[in-house]
Amino acid sequence: MMKTILLIIPDYLPVPDTLGGAIEGLVTNIVEENEKNHRADFVIISPYEKEAVIKAEKYKFTRIKYLKLPRNHQLQEKNVLGKIWRALSGRIYYLCAFLSGVRIHADAVVAEGGLYRWFGLFKMCYTDKQLFLHIHRELPAGPGFDGVFGNIIGVSDFVCERWRETSRYQQNIYSVKNAIQPDKFCRLEHLTDRRRIREIYGIREEDCLLLFCGRIIPIKGVLELVRAVNQLHMENIKLLIVGGADFSSNAQTDYVKQIREELTGQIVMTGYVPHDQTAGYYAAADVFIQPSVCEEAAPLVLLEAQASGLPVIMSDSGGGPEFVTDKTAIVVKKKNAGSDPDEAIRFSARLAEAIGFLASHPEKRQQMGEEAQDYARKFNMERYLEEFVNIFEEAEE
Protein backbone atom coordinates (compact mmCIF):
# COMPACT_ATOMS: atom_id res chain seq x y z
CA MET A 1 0.00 0.00 0.00
CA MET A 2 1.29 3.44 -0.98
CA LYS A 3 2.38 5.45 2.05
CA THR A 4 1.53 9.09 2.71
CA ILE A 5 4.60 10.91 4.01
CA LEU A 6 4.38 14.42 5.44
CA LEU A 7 7.53 16.53 5.00
CA ILE A 8 7.71 19.78 6.98
CA ILE A 9 10.16 22.26 5.47
CA PRO A 10 11.95 24.93 7.56
CA ASP A 11 10.23 28.29 7.73
CA TYR A 12 12.47 30.33 5.45
CA LEU A 13 12.76 28.95 1.89
CA PRO A 14 10.14 27.21 -0.28
CA VAL A 15 9.82 23.92 -2.15
CA PRO A 16 10.33 23.75 -5.10
CA ASP A 17 13.70 25.41 -4.48
CA THR A 18 13.08 28.67 -6.32
CA LEU A 19 15.20 30.59 -3.79
CA GLY A 20 17.92 27.99 -3.35
CA GLY A 21 18.79 26.13 -0.15
CA ALA A 22 20.36 22.68 0.30
CA ILE A 23 17.42 21.15 2.17
CA GLU A 24 14.93 22.59 -0.26
CA GLY A 25 17.03 21.38 -3.20
CA LEU A 26 17.17 17.82 -1.90
CA VAL A 27 13.43 17.71 -1.17
CA THR A 28 12.71 19.11 -4.63
CA ASN A 29 14.83 16.33 -6.14
CA ILE A 30 12.96 13.71 -4.06
CA VAL A 31 9.63 15.04 -5.29
CA GLU A 32 10.71 15.17 -8.93
CA GLU A 33 12.14 11.64 -8.83
CA ASN A 34 8.89 10.44 -7.29
CA GLU A 35 7.04 11.91 -10.25
CA LYS A 36 9.05 9.60 -12.52
CA ASN A 37 9.02 6.59 -10.21
CA HIS A 38 5.96 6.77 -7.96
CA ARG A 39 7.01 5.25 -4.61
CA ALA A 40 5.00 7.34 -2.13
CA ASP A 41 2.44 10.11 -1.83
CA PHE A 42 4.13 13.16 -0.39
CA VAL A 43 2.46 16.04 1.41
CA ILE A 44 4.71 19.04 2.04
CA ILE A 45 4.25 22.04 4.29
CA SER A 46 6.36 24.89 2.96
CA PRO A 47 6.73 28.66 3.22
CA TYR A 48 4.84 30.49 0.50
CA GLU A 49 6.61 31.89 -2.53
CA LYS A 50 4.79 32.86 -5.71
CA GLU A 51 7.07 31.15 -8.23
CA ALA A 52 7.22 27.98 -6.14
CA VAL A 53 3.43 27.75 -6.15
CA ILE A 54 3.39 27.95 -9.94
CA LYS A 55 6.11 25.31 -10.35
CA ALA A 56 4.37 22.95 -7.91
CA GLU A 57 1.25 22.76 -10.09
CA LYS A 58 2.90 20.11 -12.26
CA TYR A 59 3.23 17.54 -9.45
CA LYS A 60 0.81 14.60 -9.51
CA PHE A 61 2.01 12.67 -6.47
CA THR A 62 2.88 15.56 -4.17
CA ARG A 63 0.55 18.07 -2.53
CA ILE A 64 2.14 21.21 -1.10
CA LYS A 65 0.41 23.33 1.50
CA TYR A 66 1.95 26.78 1.52
CA LEU A 67 1.88 28.85 4.69
CA LYS A 68 1.73 32.51 3.86
CA LEU A 69 2.88 34.40 6.93
CA PRO A 70 3.69 38.11 7.31
CA ARG A 71 7.41 38.71 6.94
CA ASN A 72 9.77 41.64 7.04
CA HIS A 73 13.05 40.43 5.56
CA GLN A 74 14.71 43.81 6.06
CA LEU A 75 14.21 43.52 9.81
CA GLN A 76 15.24 39.90 10.24
CA GLU A 77 18.48 39.38 12.17
CA LYS A 78 19.53 43.01 11.69
CA ASN A 79 18.78 44.24 15.21
CA VAL A 80 16.97 43.29 18.40
CA LEU A 81 13.57 43.96 16.84
CA GLY A 82 14.49 41.88 13.81
CA LYS A 83 15.58 38.94 15.95
CA ILE A 84 12.35 39.08 17.95
CA TRP A 85 10.35 39.20 14.71
CA ARG A 86 12.30 36.25 13.28
CA ALA A 87 11.74 34.17 16.40
CA LEU A 88 8.04 35.00 16.55
CA SER A 89 7.35 34.32 12.88
CA GLY A 90 9.16 30.98 13.16
CA ARG A 91 7.00 29.87 16.07
CA ILE A 92 3.82 30.89 14.24
CA TYR A 93 4.96 28.87 11.22
CA TYR A 94 5.50 25.65 13.18
CA LEU A 95 2.24 26.03 15.08
CA CYS A 96 0.42 26.40 11.75
CA ALA A 97 2.37 23.42 10.38
CA PHE A 98 1.19 21.32 13.32
CA LEU A 99 -2.44 22.38 12.91
CA SER A 100 -2.26 21.52 9.21
CA GLY A 101 -0.34 18.29 9.77
CA VAL A 102 -2.77 16.72 12.23
CA ARG A 103 -5.53 16.90 9.62
CA ILE A 104 -3.50 15.03 7.02
CA HIS A 105 -3.38 11.65 8.82
CA ALA A 106 -0.01 10.74 7.30
CA ASP A 107 1.78 7.45 7.81
CA ALA A 108 4.94 9.35 8.79
CA VAL A 109 5.92 12.92 9.71
CA VAL A 110 9.41 14.14 8.77
CA ALA A 111 11.01 17.25 10.23
CA GLU A 112 13.35 18.59 7.55
CA GLY A 113 14.86 21.21 9.86
CA GLY A 114 13.89 24.26 11.85
CA LEU A 115 12.64 24.51 15.45
CA TYR A 116 12.82 20.83 16.34
CA ARG A 117 11.23 21.04 19.78
CA TRP A 118 7.94 22.17 18.23
CA PHE A 119 7.61 18.74 16.67
CA GLY A 120 6.87 17.44 20.14
CA LEU A 121 3.31 18.61 19.47
CA PHE A 122 2.93 15.79 16.96
CA LYS A 123 3.37 13.23 19.73
CA MET A 124 -0.24 13.98 20.67
CA CYS A 125 -1.40 12.48 17.35
CA TYR A 126 1.44 10.27 16.11
CA THR A 127 3.52 7.49 17.64
CA ASP A 128 7.30 7.63 18.04
CA LYS A 129 7.58 5.18 15.14
CA GLN A 130 5.85 7.71 12.89
CA LEU A 131 8.08 10.69 13.77
CA PHE A 132 11.32 11.20 11.82
CA LEU A 133 14.07 13.78 12.04
CA HIS A 134 15.93 14.27 8.77
CA ILE A 135 19.33 15.76 9.66
CA HIS A 136 21.04 17.87 6.98
CA ARG A 137 23.83 19.39 9.11
CA GLU A 138 26.03 18.60 12.06
CA LEU A 139 23.45 18.38 14.85
CA PRO A 140 24.22 17.10 18.32
CA ALA A 141 21.14 15.91 20.19
CA GLY A 142 20.00 18.68 22.51
CA PRO A 143 17.60 19.24 25.38
CA GLY A 144 14.09 19.98 24.23
CA PHE A 145 14.18 17.81 21.10
CA ASP A 146 16.28 14.75 21.98
CA GLY A 147 13.67 12.03 22.45
CA VAL A 148 10.99 13.73 20.33
CA PHE A 149 11.69 11.53 17.30
CA GLY A 150 11.69 7.75 17.18
CA ASN A 151 13.71 7.72 13.96
CA ILE A 152 16.73 9.66 12.71
CA ILE A 153 17.71 9.96 9.03
CA GLY A 154 21.12 11.48 8.30
CA VAL A 155 22.48 12.67 4.95
CA SER A 156 25.90 11.21 5.77
CA ASP A 157 27.51 8.74 8.14
CA PHE A 158 29.13 11.74 9.81
CA VAL A 159 25.88 13.35 10.96
CA CYS A 160 24.43 10.01 12.05
CA GLU A 161 27.45 9.30 14.23
CA ARG A 162 27.35 12.82 15.69
CA TRP A 163 23.74 12.28 16.74
CA ARG A 164 24.42 8.79 18.07
CA GLU A 165 27.26 10.09 20.26
CA THR A 166 25.13 12.79 21.88
CA SER A 167 21.61 11.32 22.19
CA ARG A 168 20.40 9.89 25.49
CA TYR A 169 17.64 7.89 23.80
CA GLN A 170 17.38 4.71 21.77
CA GLN A 171 16.29 5.46 18.21
CA ASN A 172 16.42 3.93 14.78
CA ILE A 173 19.24 5.73 12.94
CA TYR A 174 19.50 5.52 9.16
CA SER A 175 22.18 6.94 6.87
CA VAL A 176 20.84 7.83 3.42
CA LYS A 177 23.63 9.69 1.68
CA ASN A 178 22.82 12.85 -0.21
CA ALA A 179 22.06 12.58 -3.90
CA ILE A 180 21.47 14.68 -7.00
CA GLN A 181 20.13 14.27 -10.53
CA PRO A 182 23.48 13.75 -12.32
CA ASP A 183 22.10 14.22 -15.84
CA LYS A 184 21.21 17.83 -15.03
CA PHE A 185 24.93 18.55 -14.78
CA CYS A 186 26.12 16.76 -17.89
CA ARG A 187 28.98 18.89 -19.20
CA LEU A 188 28.27 18.17 -22.87
CA GLU A 189 24.78 19.66 -22.49
CA HIS A 190 26.23 22.99 -21.36
CA LEU A 191 29.09 23.67 -23.78
CA THR A 192 27.33 26.81 -25.00
CA ASP A 193 27.10 28.02 -21.41
CA ARG A 194 30.82 27.32 -20.95
CA ARG A 195 31.74 29.56 -23.86
CA ARG A 196 29.23 32.27 -22.89
CA ILE A 197 30.23 32.49 -19.22
CA ARG A 198 33.96 32.45 -19.92
CA GLU A 199 33.46 35.21 -22.50
CA ILE A 200 31.41 37.33 -20.05
CA TYR A 201 34.17 37.24 -17.45
CA GLY A 202 37.11 37.51 -19.87
CA ILE A 203 38.44 34.00 -19.21
CA ARG A 204 40.54 32.48 -21.97
CA GLU A 205 40.27 28.82 -22.89
CA GLU A 206 43.87 28.28 -21.81
CA ASP A 207 43.13 29.72 -18.33
CA CYS A 208 42.44 27.38 -15.43
CA LEU A 209 39.10 28.52 -14.00
CA LEU A 210 38.42 27.68 -10.36
CA LEU A 211 34.83 27.69 -9.11
CA PHE A 212 33.38 28.22 -5.66
CA CYS A 213 29.60 27.85 -5.39
CA GLY A 214 27.84 28.50 -2.08
CA ARG A 215 26.95 31.06 0.55
CA ILE A 216 29.48 33.83 1.16
CA ILE A 217 29.84 33.41 4.92
CA PRO A 218 32.93 32.83 7.10
CA ILE A 219 32.39 29.10 7.72
CA LYS A 220 32.54 28.41 3.98
CA GLY A 221 36.23 29.45 3.87
CA VAL A 222 35.87 31.89 0.97
CA LEU A 223 38.41 34.35 2.36
CA GLU A 224 40.95 31.56 2.81
CA LEU A 225 40.38 30.56 -0.81
CA VAL A 226 40.83 34.13 -2.08
CA ARG A 227 44.09 34.40 -0.17
CA ALA A 228 45.25 31.06 -1.58
CA VAL A 229 44.73 32.29 -5.15
CA ASN A 230 46.39 35.63 -4.44
CA GLN A 231 49.57 34.08 -3.06
CA LEU A 232 50.13 31.90 -6.15
CA HIS A 233 50.82 34.77 -8.60
CA MET A 234 49.90 32.51 -11.54
CA GLU A 235 48.30 34.57 -14.30
CA ASN A 236 46.52 31.61 -15.88
CA ILE A 237 44.47 30.96 -12.71
CA LYS A 238 41.04 32.62 -12.42
CA LEU A 239 38.41 32.23 -9.70
CA LEU A 240 34.63 32.64 -9.94
CA ILE A 241 32.85 33.01 -6.60
CA VAL A 242 29.19 32.16 -7.22
CA GLY A 243 26.68 32.88 -4.47
CA GLY A 244 25.29 35.44 -2.06
CA ALA A 245 25.63 36.00 1.65
CA ASP A 246 22.15 34.74 2.52
CA PHE A 247 20.83 32.29 -0.07
CA SER A 248 19.15 34.44 -2.76
CA SER A 249 20.26 37.70 -1.13
CA ASN A 250 23.23 39.72 -2.38
CA ALA A 251 23.54 41.59 0.90
CA GLN A 252 26.86 43.44 1.32
CA THR A 253 27.78 42.03 4.72
CA ASP A 254 31.02 42.90 6.50
CA TYR A 255 32.42 39.54 5.38
CA VAL A 256 31.50 40.15 1.74
CA LYS A 257 33.11 43.60 1.95
CA GLN A 258 36.27 42.09 3.45
CA ILE A 259 36.52 39.64 0.56
CA ARG A 260 35.95 42.40 -2.01
CA GLU A 261 38.84 44.36 -0.54
CA GLU A 262 41.18 41.46 -1.32
CA LEU A 263 39.98 40.76 -4.86
CA THR A 264 42.42 41.00 -7.73
CA GLY A 265 41.78 40.95 -11.46
CA GLN A 266 41.92 37.17 -11.32
CA ILE A 267 38.89 36.85 -9.06
CA VAL A 268 35.24 37.68 -9.79
CA MET A 269 32.21 37.56 -7.49
CA THR A 270 29.05 36.91 -9.52
CA GLY A 271 26.48 37.29 -6.73
CA TYR A 272 23.57 34.90 -6.30
CA VAL A 273 22.82 32.59 -9.23
CA PRO A 274 19.56 30.54 -9.23
CA HIS A 275 20.21 26.85 -8.74
CA ASP A 276 18.74 25.91 -12.12
CA GLN A 277 21.46 28.02 -13.76
CA THR A 278 24.46 26.69 -11.83
CA ALA A 279 25.08 23.79 -14.24
CA GLY A 280 26.37 26.31 -16.76
CA TYR A 281 28.91 27.64 -14.25
CA TYR A 282 30.14 24.14 -13.44
CA ALA A 283 30.58 23.57 -17.18
CA ALA A 284 32.54 26.80 -17.49
CA ALA A 285 35.00 25.78 -14.76
CA ASP A 286 38.06 23.53 -14.76
CA VAL A 287 38.39 22.85 -11.00
CA PHE A 288 35.85 23.02 -8.18
CA ILE A 289 36.94 24.27 -4.74
CA GLN A 290 35.07 23.55 -1.49
CA PRO A 291 37.17 25.20 1.27
CA SER A 292 34.76 24.98 4.24
CA VAL A 293 36.27 25.55 7.67
CA CYS A 294 33.20 24.17 9.48
CA GLU A 295 31.98 20.58 9.70
CA GLU A 296 29.79 20.24 6.59
CA ALA A 297 27.26 17.42 6.68
CA ALA A 298 27.12 16.36 3.04
CA PRO A 299 27.65 19.16 0.51
CA LEU A 300 25.52 18.67 -2.59
CA VAL A 301 27.91 20.94 -4.52
CA LEU A 302 30.57 18.21 -4.34
CA LEU A 303 28.28 15.81 -6.19
CA GLU A 304 27.12 18.46 -8.66
CA ALA A 305 30.70 19.43 -9.48
CA GLN A 306 31.78 15.82 -9.96
CA ALA A 307 28.73 15.09 -12.12
CA SER A 308 29.90 18.01 -14.26
CA GLY A 309 33.26 16.30 -14.74
CA LEU A 310 35.24 18.59 -12.45
CA PRO A 311 38.14 17.55 -10.23
CA VAL A 312 37.66 18.77 -6.67
CA ILE A 313 39.90 20.45 -4.12
CA MET A 314 38.23 20.41 -0.71
CA SER A 315 38.80 20.61 3.02
CA ASP A 316 38.46 17.52 5.19
CA SER A 317 35.19 18.91 6.49
CA GLY A 318 32.67 16.68 8.27
CA GLY A 319 30.94 14.25 5.92
CA GLY A 320 32.39 15.75 2.74
CA PRO A 321 35.09 13.09 2.25
CA GLU A 322 32.34 10.43 2.10
CA PHE A 323 31.33 11.86 -1.29
CA VAL A 324 34.70 11.81 -3.09
CA THR A 325 37.57 9.39 -3.69
CA ASP A 326 41.31 9.91 -3.96
CA LYS A 327 40.84 9.61 -7.72
CA THR A 328 38.35 12.50 -7.91
CA ALA A 329 39.51 14.95 -5.24
CA ILE A 330 42.44 16.42 -3.36
CA VAL A 331 41.46 16.66 0.31
CA VAL A 332 43.25 19.38 2.29
CA LYS A 333 43.44 19.40 6.08
CA LYS A 334 41.70 22.43 7.54
CA LYS A 335 42.60 21.75 11.20
CA ASN A 336 41.39 24.77 13.24
CA ALA A 337 41.29 27.24 10.36
CA GLY A 338 37.84 28.46 11.37
CA SER A 339 38.96 29.66 14.79
CA ASP A 340 42.76 30.08 14.68
CA PRO A 341 44.07 32.91 12.41
CA ASP A 342 47.51 31.30 12.16
CA GLU A 343 45.98 27.99 11.14
CA ALA A 344 43.82 29.81 8.58
CA ILE A 345 47.03 31.14 6.98
CA ARG A 346 48.47 27.62 6.85
CA PHE A 347 45.19 26.31 5.41
CA SER A 348 45.35 28.90 2.62
CA ALA A 349 48.90 27.77 1.87
CA ARG A 350 47.79 24.14 1.61
CA LEU A 351 44.92 25.15 -0.69
CA ALA A 352 47.36 27.14 -2.82
CA GLU A 353 49.65 24.13 -3.18
CA ALA A 354 46.77 21.93 -4.40
CA ILE A 355 45.49 24.63 -6.76
CA GLY A 356 48.93 25.24 -8.21
CA PHE A 357 49.38 21.52 -8.86
CA LEU A 358 46.12 21.07 -10.78
CA ALA A 359 46.52 24.36 -12.63
CA SER A 360 49.90 23.15 -13.87
CA HIS A 361 48.75 19.63 -14.84
CA PRO A 362 45.79 19.77 -17.27
CA GLU A 363 46.13 16.05 -18.02
CA LYS A 364 45.61 15.29 -14.31
CA ARG A 365 42.53 17.52 -14.27
CA GLN A 366 41.15 15.62 -17.24
CA GLN A 367 41.78 12.24 -15.64
CA MET A 368 40.26 13.24 -12.30
CA GLY A 369 37.26 14.84 -14.02
CA GLU A 370 36.46 11.66 -15.93
CA GLU A 371 36.68 9.61 -12.74
CA ALA A 372 34.51 12.17 -10.95
CA GLN A 373 31.76 12.03 -13.53
CA ASP A 374 31.51 8.25 -13.28
CA TYR A 375 31.65 8.30 -9.49
CA ALA A 376 28.89 10.93 -9.10
CA ARG A 377 26.42 8.71 -10.93
CA LYS A 378 26.33 6.42 -7.89
CA PHE A 379 24.65 9.22 -5.95
CA ASN A 380 21.52 9.41 -8.08
CA MET A 381 17.99 10.22 -6.98
CA GLU A 382 16.57 6.87 -8.08
CA ARG A 383 18.77 5.18 -5.49
CA TYR A 384 18.02 7.86 -2.90
CA LEU A 385 14.22 7.68 -3.28
CA GLU A 386 14.26 3.89 -2.97
CA GLU A 387 16.33 3.96 0.24
CA PHE A 388 14.35 6.90 1.64
CA VAL A 389 10.92 5.31 1.20
CA ASN A 390 12.14 1.90 2.40
CA ILE A 391 13.00 3.46 5.75
CA PHE A 392 9.35 4.21 6.49
CA GLU A 393 8.40 0.64 5.74
CA GLU A 394 11.21 -0.71 7.93
CA ALA A 395 10.39 1.60 10.85
CA GLU A 396 6.80 0.36 10.86
CA GLU A 397 7.84 -3.25 11.46
Image: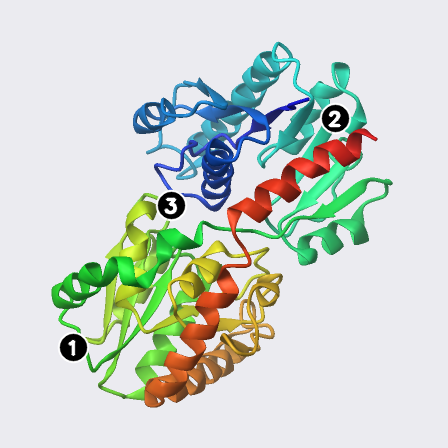
State whether residue 15 appears in this view: yes
Q: x, y (%) of residue 290? A: 45, 67
Kind of element beneath mark 3: loop
- In the rendering, at what x and y percent does residue 123 appear? 76, 20
Give the spatial CA distance, label 1 vs label 3. Answer: 29 Å
The residue indicated by pointer 3 is: 247
Give the crowd class for mark 3: few <14, some 14-19, many >=20 residues within 10 Å: some
Asked if labels 3 and 1 touch by Cβ distance under 8 angstroms, the answer is no
- Residue 283 horizontal side relative to residue 2, left or right: left
Q: Which residue is mark 1?
A: 204
Tell me the residue at 50%/59% (across/down).
377
The residue wearing badge 2 is 130
Secondary structure type for disc 2: helix
Q: Nearer the viewer, mark 1 or mark 3?
A: 1
- Answer above or below: position of 269 versus 394: below
Q: Choose between 303 and 257: the one closer to the eye.
A: 303
**Amino acid type indicated by mark 1:** Arg
The answer to whether 329 is drawn above or below residue 166 in the figure is below
Residue drawn at x 41%, y 74% is 369
